[in-house]
């Protein structure tokens, strides 16, 4: 398993895999839900790459929600519990409950696709800030 996957799921900076992508650590805290620091506290990576950068994360989010829906459909079918009512209720509940985390992890995946990991990023940043 790649070391990138745990850092993506933990919502860490893709460049150093140490700094937090979001100001609030909880995905379920409403106030400041989307707030991200301008730069990584560990390596200085800019999180505001360009205006509208995170619009691409909507496509990632869409893919994840489709995967959740398909997983629920398959599970209900395998367990022989499928009915349209049970499927819709379970799917809506699952999507509402997972929506905050899916939104954040979609941003994490999107930026990880665009920013390359650098094992020396923290050291380089420290040298620049503390000469």
Image (cartoon, rainbow, N blue to C red):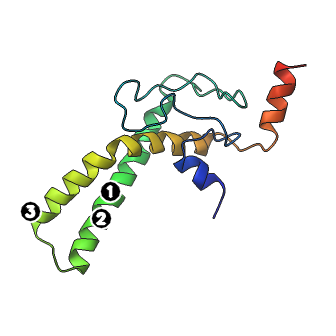
Query: Is disc 2 in contact with disc 1, using a CB cutoff of under 8 Å?
Result: yes
Q: Secondary structure at mark 2?
A: helix
The residue that label 1 is drawn on is 66
Q: Residue at x 82, y 40 (%)?
A: 120
Residue 104 percent location from the top left of the image: 44, 40
Q: Residue at x 65, y 39 (%)?
A: 115
Q: Residue at x 82, y 27 (%)?
A: 126
Between the residue at mark 3 and the residue at mark 1, the CA separation in whole angstroms equals: 18 Å
Residue 6 percent location from the top left of the image: 59, 53
Among numbered discs 3 and 1, the one appearing first in the sequence: 1
The residue that label 2 is drawn on is 70
Q: Residue at x 21, y 52 (%)?
A: 93
Name the quarter where the N terminus is drawn.
bottom right
The residue that label 3 is drawn on is 85
Q: Which mark is residue 99?
A: none
Residue 40 percent location from the top left of the image: 65, 29
**Horizontal side, residue 93 vs residue 128: left or right:** left
Among numbered discs 3 and 2, the one appearing first in the sequence: 2
Image height check: is 43 above or below 9? above
Q: Secondary structure at mark 3?
A: helix
């Amino acid at each position: 398993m790649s070391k990138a996957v745990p850092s993506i799921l933990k919502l860490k900076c893709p460049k150093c895999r140490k700094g937090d992508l979001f100001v609030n650590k909880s995905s379920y805290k409403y106030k400041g839900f989307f707030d991200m620091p301008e730069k990584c506290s560990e390596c200085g990576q800019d999180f505001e790459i360009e205006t509208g950068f995170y619009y691409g994360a909507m496509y990632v989010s869409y893919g994840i929600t489709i995967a959740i829906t398909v997983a629920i459909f398959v599970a209900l079918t395998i367990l022989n519990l499928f009915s349209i009512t049970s499927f819709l209720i379970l799917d809506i509940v699952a999507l509402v409950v997972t929506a905050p985390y899916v939104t954040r992890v979609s941003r994490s995946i999107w930026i990880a696709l665009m920013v390359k990991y650098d094992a020396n990023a923290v050291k380089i940043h420290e040298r620049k800030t503390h000469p």
